[in-house]
Amino acid sequence: MAPAALFPALALVAGAAGGIAFQSPWRPLLWLLPMLVVAAWLAWRNRRQRATLAALVFAYGCCGFVLGSHAREEAIDTPLRRAVGDDLGRPIPTRLRLTEDADSDDTLTILRGRVMAVRAGDDWAPADGGLVVSVGGVAGRTHAAEWRRGRLLEAPIAYRRPHAT
């Protein structure tokens, strides 16, 4: 015999994974949850064990889906993404604080930092988000010794969406 919490736990995990993997509206499911709870209660009251289990498993799956979808939206819609907007690919003046020393080789220098602000028009707008900047050529090598953790930089940066790994 399986533990009582096995199927609801599996449904919760599967729902969360589905909510993260698939971009779909999750708010309508909030209206379905009270109905599933009432259905599970009615099935339990009428001693319908399989119907009770099915309603509970479906409710847990919906809860997981809602939680996963909401977490996905929050992870994607960052303050930095909102500040940059649709200006991807166009250099945007950016202030960032380096979180690591520059990593340099013969052809490329990598900077990792935290964005403090971006300039939208004439004003600096606060923005928060991590980023990795690639600086190619001689310019990166000559300045790499100056780019140390904690340093505040101001530079035009062309943003792009990160690729899935």
Image (cartoon, rainbow, N blue to C red):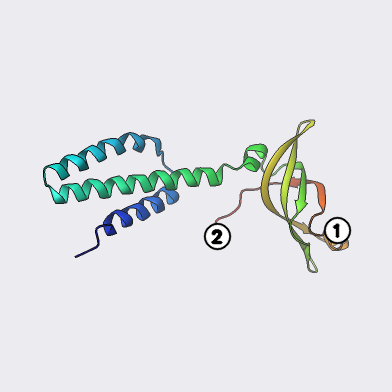
Among the 4 quarters of the image, the one containing residue 148: bottom right
**What amino acid type should be assigned to the residue bearing mark 2?**
Thr
Please identify the quadrant where the C terminus is shown: bottom right
Query: Which residue position holds label 1?
Result: 139
**What amino acid type should be assigned to the residue bearing mark 1?**
Ala
Q: Position of residue 88 (x, y in %)?
A: 66, 42
Please identify the quadrant where the N terminus is shown: bottom left
What residue do we see at 50% from left, 43% from top? 73
Vertical position of residue 28 compared to residue 12: above or below: above
Q: Position of residue 39 (x, y in %)?
A: 20, 39
Q: Is residue 44 visible?
A: yes
Of 129 and 137, which appears nearest the observer? 129
Q: Is residue 86 visible?
A: no
Left/right of residue 149 with respect to residue 30 in the rendered view: right
Structural crowding at the residue carrying mark 2, measured as other residues with C-alpha within 10 Å and reported as few (<14), some (14–19) or many (≥20): few
Q: Position of residue 130 (x, y in %)?
A: 67, 51
Q: How many marks?
A: 2
3D distance between C-alphas at marks 1 and 2: 29 Å
Residue extending farthest bottom: 106
Q: Which comes sooner in the sequence, label 1 or label 2? A: 1
Residue extending farthest top: 122
Of 11 and 52, which appears nearest the observer? 52
Among the 4 quarters of the image, the one containing residue 101: bottom right
Where disc 1 sits, the SS reads helix
Where disc 2 sits, the SS reads loop
What residue do we see at 85% from left, 61% from top? 138
> What mark, if any, has residue 165 been given in the picture?
2
What residue do we see at 11% from left, 47% from top? 47
Vertical position of residue 107 compared to residue 156: above or below: below
